[in-house]
Amino acid sequence: MVSAALIKKLDQLPPDLQTQIEKDVDRLLKKITNADLVNSDQTIRGYGSLKGKIWVSEDFDEPLEDFKDYM
């Protein structure tokens, strides 16, 4: 069993290294938890999912009135 072998090896390490490994394991667990939260909040959107939400004015390509003096 992997857990028993890992615990046996951890017991052989000095206390300062055990503390460092504990911090590393906590960091990895936090990373996994954050990744799960990010993945659960994301929804997959397909083409056309924002139809009707965005529009472009008919005169979008027309020159701006602010630049009339320069044209």
Image (cartoon, rainbow, N blue to C red):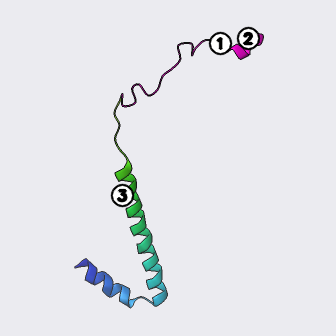
Give the labeled residue for mark 3. Answer: 36
Q: Residue at x 77, y 11 (%)?
A: 69
Vertically, is 45 above or below 9? above
Most distant residue in the front direction: 52
- Asked whether 49 or 12 is in front, the reply is 49
Q: Residue 63 carries which label?
A: 1
Is residue 61 found inside the magenta-colored segment of the image? yes
Cβ–Cβ under 8 Å for marks 2 and 1 = yes
Q: Residue at x 72, y 16 (%)?
A: 66
Q: Quadrant of the image for the N terminus?
A: bottom left
Tell me the crowding category of disc 3: few under 14, some 14 to 19, or many 20 or more residues within 10 angstroms, Cα based. Answer: few
Q: Position of residue 12 (x, y in %)?
A: 38, 90
Most distant residue in the right direction: 69
Identify residue type, mark 1.
Pro
For the stretch drawn in magenta, what is the main secondary structure?
Answer: loop
Rounded to the nearest whole Å, what is the CA distance between mark 2 and mark 1? Answer: 8 Å
Q: Where is residue 28 in the image (x, y as percent from the top left)?
A: 41, 68
Q: What stretch is highlighted in magenta?
A: 48-71
Upstream in sequence: badge 1 or badge 3: 3
Identify residue type, mark 3.
Asp
Identify residue type, mark 2.
Lys
Rounded to the nearest whole Å, what is the CA distance between mark 3 and mark 2? Answer: 54 Å
Q: Quadrant of the image for the C terminus?
A: top right
Vertically, is 41 above or below 21? above
With 29 as the anchor, is 2 left or right in this view? left
Give the labeled residue for mark 2. Answer: 68
Q: Position of residue 42 (x, y in %)?
A: 37, 47
